[in-house]
Image: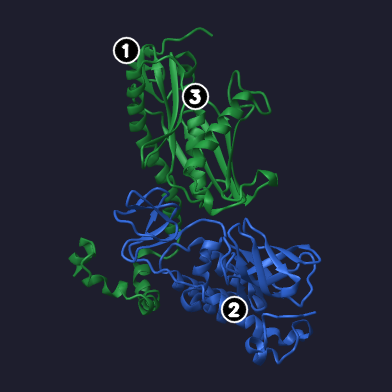
Chain colours: A blue, B green
């Protein structure tokens, strides 16, 4: 009945001690979340741009054809198709606005919008819904549950299949624009680790721009994340965030003293 | 109303020259809940454009499995004008304009990135004074860019025509109503493709090609304003970045560059790179 499971012992064995997912005592779930966090962190390509400037759709990027995401080539020249930051030296174009499009192996945070016999439909803050097959999960979810999952497959008409799902209990959710997510994670997860260390919160960043925060100084964490979203295109952000976290944690310590 | 004199001593009814545009103000990102938005004041025209999407296409049977649907809705507010416009509800005119504007954007939006979805563009004319369809289109292009929807170009439009026997550009209400001919057009400034072209009245071949030339000149100015409006959003935000610039640049070097260099040797190699612009070399 439970047939073939994608998360065999070789992946979860050590952390989960061979327990079936649904039977795991909640207190011992930490490693699981940690793993998702690490995986999510992989997506944090930090954009270091030295002479980056804002470009608009149709703006010339290069006189030669240079295939890159969010650009298009017309008559041998490269143009931007979005509003974004373009760095001439590294030839990188990063969009400033946009919606989330699911990619293989993205970690996303979804909300259950439909429960069917065959599985669950999840809102993943995208034009497309995610589908979590009942075969791909042992947990049972209810309408409105917040779920972290991995994108297992996206086909050409954008049917999105999810897997490796687990429910997120408690906590809070912040929504930001998905194009700012790499900045929130930072290079090698540096930014998110800074926030986690300063606020002592558990944080899971979904590639779709949903961020789940539990425990610690979550108000400060949210403030920091929203600040990153607002100022994602500026330079010297890491320092400003660590400054905010320093002053913020001092402030909240004072607050708790009263 | 009787036909007023539209050209007096080579000046137009509002004192403009034949090729002058009315003052144009564009602001991007004015609405909170929309994915992208823009507000345009074009002379006495006031236009708000909002973009929602790409989002699920409803009704589902309209959805295209290959590309996104671009649906524009042009609407004149009941209070937008003194005379004829002012009825609520869809009109013959509004339906037509919605259709032609949708077709303009079908040509520039890279809709194949978003199969099965719809991109909704709402153009609301809050105050009308001639040339509202091109003002609406100009606003919609900025709103689409603000929503982060990939496009081949930032389209913009302008109306031209003939008043009292003379060719002119950017018609106001009276010129529109009492002129001999009126041509609204929309252009992709990057390629020079004409994406919308309508005509009222009669003109000779030569007059039309002259108006197109005048239109292209005017569109360059409008396009520059669109670009400026979009870029302003981010430059403004940068200013509000809290840290004074001098301090910021000093801090920058310490923290943010170090990890960057590890993965990508380019920034460190900059000073010796031949492609580096002159300013860096001057520093060295």
Q: Chain of mark 1?
A: B
Query: In the depicted view, which residue is nearer to us: A31 or B204?
Result: B204
- Camera-nearest label, 3 or 2: 2
Tell me residue A87's x, y (percent).
35, 62
The residue tagged 1 is: B9
As measured in the structure, the alpha-carbon distance from the residue carrying label 3 to the one carrying label 2 is 56 Å
Report helix, strand or loop for mark 2: helix
Tell me residue A28's x, y (percent).
72, 88
* Side (left or right) of B180 relative to A114: left
Label whose residue precedes the other's in the sequence (3 or 1): 1
The residue tagged 2 is: A37
As measured in the structure, the alpha-carbon distance from the residue carrying label 2 to the one carrying label 1 is 73 Å
- Residue drawn where x is 49% and y is 24% of the image: B130
Tell me residue A149's x, y (percent).
66, 72
As measured in the structure, the alpha-carbon distance from the residue carrying label 3 to the one carrying label 1 is 22 Å
Query: In the depicted view, which residue is nearer to us: B66 or B207?
Result: B66
- Camera-nearest label, 2 or 1: 2
Is residue B71 positioned above or below B95 on the image?
Answer: below
The residue tagged 3 is: B130
- Residue drawn where x is 56% and y is 57% of the image: A99
- Image quarter (top left, top right, bottom left or bottom right) of the N terminus of chain B: top right
Tell me residue A213's x, y (percent).
65, 73
Q: Chain of mark 3?
A: B
Neighbours of disc 3 within 10 Å: few (<14), some (14-19), many (20+) = many
Neighbours of disc 1 within 10 Å: few (<14), some (14-19), many (20+) = few
Q: Quadrant of residue B164?
A: top left
Is residue B130 positioned above or below A7 on the image?
Answer: above
Report helix, strand or loop for mark 1: loop
* Side (left or right) of A123 relative to A1: left
- Image quarter (top left, top right, bottom left or bottom right) of the C terminus of chain B: bottom left
Neighbours of disc 2 within 10 Å: few (<14), some (14-19), many (20+) = many
């Amino acid at each position: 009945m439970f047939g073939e499971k994608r998360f065999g012992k070789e992946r979860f064995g050590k952390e989960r001690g061979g327990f079936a997912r649904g039977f795991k005592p909640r207190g011992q779930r930490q490693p699981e979340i940690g793993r998702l966090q690490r995986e999510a962190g992989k997506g944090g390509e930090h954009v270091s741009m030295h002479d980056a400037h804002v470009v608009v759709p149709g703006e010339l990027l290069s006189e030669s054809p240079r295939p890159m995401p969010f650009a298009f080539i017309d008559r041998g020249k490269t143009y931007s198709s979005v509003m974004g930051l373009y760095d001439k030296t590294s030839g990188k174009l990063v969009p400033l606005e946009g919606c989330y499009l699911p990619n293989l192996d993205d970690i996303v945070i979804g909300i259950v919008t439909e429960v069917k016999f065959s599985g669950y439909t999840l809102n993943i803050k995208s034009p497309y819904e995610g589908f979590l097959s009942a075969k791909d999960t042992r947990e049972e979810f209810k309408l409105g549950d917040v779920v972290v999952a991995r994108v297992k497959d996206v086909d050409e008409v954008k049917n999105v299949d999810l897997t490796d799902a687990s429910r997120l209990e408690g906590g809070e959710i912040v929504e930001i624009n998905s194009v700012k997510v790499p900045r929130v994670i930072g290079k090698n997860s540096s930014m998110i680790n800074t926030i986690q260390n300063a606020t002592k919160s558990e944080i899971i960043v979904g590639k779709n721009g949903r961020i789940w925060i539990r425990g610690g100084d979550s108000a400060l964490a949210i403030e920091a994340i929203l600040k990153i979203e607002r100022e994602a295109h500026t330079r010297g952000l890491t320092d400003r965030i660590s400054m905010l976290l320093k002053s913020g944690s001092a402030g909240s310590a004072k607050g708790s003293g009263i | 109303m009787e036909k007023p004199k539209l050209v007096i001593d080579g000046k137009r009814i509002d004192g403009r020259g034949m090729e002058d545009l009315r003052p144009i103000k564009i602001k991007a990102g004015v609405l909170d809940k929309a994915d992208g938005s823009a507000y345009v004041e074009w002379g006495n025209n006031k236009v708000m454009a909002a973009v929602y999407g790409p989002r699920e296409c409803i009704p589902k049977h309209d959805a295209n499995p290959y590309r996104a649907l671009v649906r524009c809705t042009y609407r004149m507010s009941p209070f937008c004008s003194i005379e004829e416009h002012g009825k609520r509800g869809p009109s013959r005119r509004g339906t037509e304009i919605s259709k032609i504007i949708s077709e303009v954007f079908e040509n520039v939006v890279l809709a194949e990135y978003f199969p099965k979805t719809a991109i909704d563009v709402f153009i609301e004319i809050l105050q009308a004074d001639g040339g509202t369809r091109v003002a609406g289109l100009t606003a919609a292009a900025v709103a689409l860019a603000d929503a982060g929807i990939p496009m081949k170009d930032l389209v913009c439009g302008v109306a031209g025509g003939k008043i009292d026997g003379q060719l002119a550009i950017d018609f106001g209400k009276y010129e529109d109503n009492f002129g001999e001919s009126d041509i609204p057009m929309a252009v992709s400034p990057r390629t020079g493709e004409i994406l919308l072209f309508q005509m009222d009245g009669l003109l000779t071949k030569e007059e039309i090609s002259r108006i197109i030339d005048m239109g292209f000149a005017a569109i360059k100015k409008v396009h520059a304003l669109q670009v400026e409006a979009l870029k302003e959003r981010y430059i403004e935000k940068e200013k509000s970045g809290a840290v004074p610039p001098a301090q910021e640049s000093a801090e920058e070097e310490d923290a943010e560059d170090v990890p960057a260099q590890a993965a990508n040797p380019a920034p460190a190699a900059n000073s010796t790179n031949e492609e580096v612009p002159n300013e860096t070399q001057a520093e060295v």
